[in-house]
Every structure is written in C-alpha cells, then in structure tokens.
C-alpha cells in the first residue's frame, strides 16, 4: 500500500507527464504546419549526409576501363558500295553486342573489330527496334570477350558528368569526350547521314559534349565506367549556326536493355524485330486517304515479282487494315522471310488481292 507522500509524488509525476505530452502534441501540430517553436529545435547534427563535391571525371582513367569492352562496327551495302562506321558495346563473352540500329540499317554484311585484340568478326543481326534506334548483333566465333559493366540510367541527374566513347570519324581508334548532362528526356529529329532519312527520337539523354559521327552505338558511361546510355546522335549544323555549343544524345541504358531482353525472348512486337528481316522490296509513303502508297517496287524483289506497281496503295495485310506506311512496317515486323502474305491493294484499275512471298533483306 502506498502512503500519502507516495501518492503526492505520483500525482505530481502524472501532472508533469500530462504537461509534457500536451507540449509534444502542440509541437507536432505546429511542426506539420512548418511553425515548430524554437524551444523544440533539435540539436544540430554532428555530421552531414551530403558529402563533399565529387572530383572531376578522369576521362583517361575511365576510358582505360571501358575501351576493352567496345568494338568498331563496319556495315556494308553490297550493291551500292556504301558503308557506315559505328561502335558497339559487348554484353556477353560469346559476342552479343549492343549498338544503334542506324549503324547496321540496310546493311548486307556487318563486320566487327575487337579493339582489345584487333580480331575481326562477321556479325549477324539478332534483332532491333528502329523506333528507339537500338540493335543487338552477334559475333560469329567469338569467345571470352571482355564485357561492359552495365549500369542504370534511373539515378542520373542534370549536371552529372559522363563520358561518351566510341569510334569517332570511323578512324578505328576510340575517342572519348566528357561533359555534363543537360537533359534527361530530350526529343530530337535525327538525320541519318548514310541515307538522309529522318527520325524522331524521344527520351534521350542530352550531354554537353562534342560527340562525333562514328561514336553512334558507343557507350555513355559514368565516372565509374558503368554504361548508362548508348550514344545515338550529335547536334547538327543548325545548332552550330545558332552559336550553341555541341551536344550529344544517348538512349538511356534501361530503355536499351528492355529492347535487348525482348530480342532475347525471341518474341517480336510491332516495334521490336527479331531475327532476319522479311522484305517486300518496296519504298512507301503515306497515302492521303489512308494506306501505304508504293513509291517504288524494286525490280526483282517480291512485290515487283508479284505484279505490284508504283502508285498502287496497300490497304490491308492478311486482312489487317493498313492506314499508314508505318502501319505496314509494323505488320511486316512480325513476319519472317519465306512467309506468304495477302495484300489488298487499290489502284487505277480498282481493288485487288495479291499474294506475296517475303524475302530476306537487310535490316529495314
């Protein structure tokens, strides 16, 4: 049993506890409102979670780390004697290489030079997504190749210093240029210098660096040598004429690796093509009233052999309505060489249906 003095002490304790609890409640209310009284300010921290500024990126050191996992790519168009030079990033010791689609676009043959050993390999195109400008190729007979360290583009921030490295100018020797990130979701209209075609690319990483032709397909890496992007484009003459500094653009590595995984799965989509490219052998454009207009049916190619002529308009493939030239490309994207497709076409003589056997062709 407690005596009266104990009860008194207990009562006083309860009173102080209630006062303290009330004060905490008031402080919590005011704190949520941004008006925490000074007498509830916490003690200043003894250390900070924000460290000192990072040192400048050392381009020489990072290049030395990355170069062994890079390759030079030469794509050739046999009939026209044309070629394109680019770069690639080695993903597996057996020779899977990540590059830009436009580097291998239209190529009859692709040859790859290992920067580390100087060995030359013939490459096969495993698949690509032309809308994202990403391709995956395989080097025949390759083994025990050094592989790149794949990072992530998710934590990138404006101002982060990165390094773009690749086969600038097609000289065969890698060139590295460093600069800060100036954009994380840039949209550009890229012009392919090989065939002068134009393409809108979205979600690009923009870097304030003098990226040059030939670095396409090369690596954009962070200060630790981890790949955070695939170099895709450089600023054009218009930007230079406006007095603006040089910029380079890269596909975020997270986006690129999503395409790689889709190709590896063996399942094509409307945008991701897997395996050899099936072609009709035509050049098309959008028809005003809907459909894909045949601007040119190349002599000896499947469409020409089936009797399709310039000026006719393809309005359906295997019963699937075609509203644009892009819709036609998407429909063919999931087909394979030797597939037979049924085309509904319209022309001066009305509508007709034609069966065409697709042939293997260069990456679209």
Image (cartoon, grey):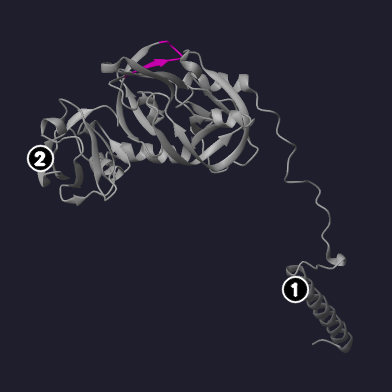
Residue 337: image location, x then y, percent: 18, 32
Numbered circle sitting on residue 29:
1
Q: Secondary structure at mark 2?
A: strand
- Magenta-highlighted residues: 110-118
> Considering depth in this image, is 288 or 211 the residue closer to the camera?
288
Taking the spot 39% from the left edge, 20% from the top edge, the residue there is: 84
Figure quadrant of the N terminus: bottom right
The question of residue 250 being in magenta is answered with no
Residue 280: image location, x then y, percent: 19, 34
The answer to the question of whether label 1 and label 2 lie on touching residues, with beta carbons closer than 8 A, is no
Figure quadrant of the C terminus: top left
Taking the spot 58% from the left edge, 25% from the top edge, the residue there is: 210
Question: Can residue 132 be spotted in the picture?
Answer: yes
Taking the spot 41% from the left edge, 30% from the top edge, the residue there is: 100
Please indicate whether residue 47 sits to the left or right of residue 293 in the image. right
- For label 2, the residue is 355
Bin the neighbour count of mark 1 within 10 Å (Cα to Cα): few under 14, some 14-19, many 20 and up. Answer: few
View extreme (top): residue: 118
Residue 302: image location, x then y, percent: 15, 31
Please indicate whether residue 326 sits to the left or right of residue 173 in the image. left
> Considering depth in this image, is 27 or 247 the residue closer to the camera?
247
Bin the neighbour count of mark 2 within 10 Å (Cα to Cα): few under 14, some 14-19, many 20 and up. Answer: some
- Can you tell which quarter of the image residue 3 is in? bottom right
Q: Secondary structure at mark 1?
A: helix
> Considering depth in this image, is 143 or 318 the residue closer to the camera?
318
> Considering depth in this image, is 76 or 27 the residue closer to the camera?
76
């Amino acid at each position: 049993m407690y005596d009266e003095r104990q009860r008194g002490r207990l009562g006083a304790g309860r009173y102080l506890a209630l006062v303290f609890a009330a004060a905490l409640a008031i402080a919590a209310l005011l704190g949520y409102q941004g008006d925490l009284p000074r007498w509830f300010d916490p003690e200043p921290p003894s250390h900070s979670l924000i460290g000192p500024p990072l040192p400048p990126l050392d381009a020489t050191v990072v290049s030395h780390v990355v170069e062994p996992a890079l390759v030079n790519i030469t794509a050739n168009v046999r009939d026209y004697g044309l070629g394109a030079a680019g770069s690639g990033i080695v993903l597996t010791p057996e020779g899977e290489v990540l590059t830009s689609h436009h580097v291998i676009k239209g190529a009859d043959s692709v040859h790859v030079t290992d920067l580390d050993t100087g060995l030359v390999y013939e490459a096969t195109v495993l698949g690509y997504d032309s809308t994202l400008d990403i391709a995956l190729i395989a080097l025949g007979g390759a083994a025990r190749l050094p592989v790149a360290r794949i990072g992530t583009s998710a934590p990138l921030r404006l101002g982060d210093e990165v390094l773009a490295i690749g086969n600038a100018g097609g000289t065969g020797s890698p060139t590295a240029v460093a600069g800060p990130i100036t954009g994380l979701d840039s949209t550009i209209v890229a012009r392919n210098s090989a065939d002068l075609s134009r393409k809108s690319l979205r979600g690009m990483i923009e870097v304030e660096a003098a990226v040059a032709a030939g670095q396409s397909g090369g690596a954009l890496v962070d200060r630790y040598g981890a790949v955070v992007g695939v170099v895709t484009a450089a600023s054009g003459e218009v930007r230079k004429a406006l007095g603006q500094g040089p910029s380079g653009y890269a596909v975020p590595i997270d986006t690129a690796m999503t395409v790689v995984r889709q190709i590896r799965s063996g399942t094509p989509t409307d945008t991701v093509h897997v395996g050899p490219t099936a072609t009709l052998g035509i050049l098309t454009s959008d028809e005003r009233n809907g459909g894909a207009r045949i601007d040119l049916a190349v002599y000896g190619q499947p469409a020409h052999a089936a009797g399709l002529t310039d000026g006719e308009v393809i309005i359906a493939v295997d019963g699937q309505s075609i509203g644009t030239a892009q819709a036609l490309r998407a429909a063919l994207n999931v087909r394979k060489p030797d597939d037979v497709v049924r085309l509904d076409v319209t022309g001066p003589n009305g509508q007709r249906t034609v069966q065409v056997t697709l042939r293997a062709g260069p990456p679209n």
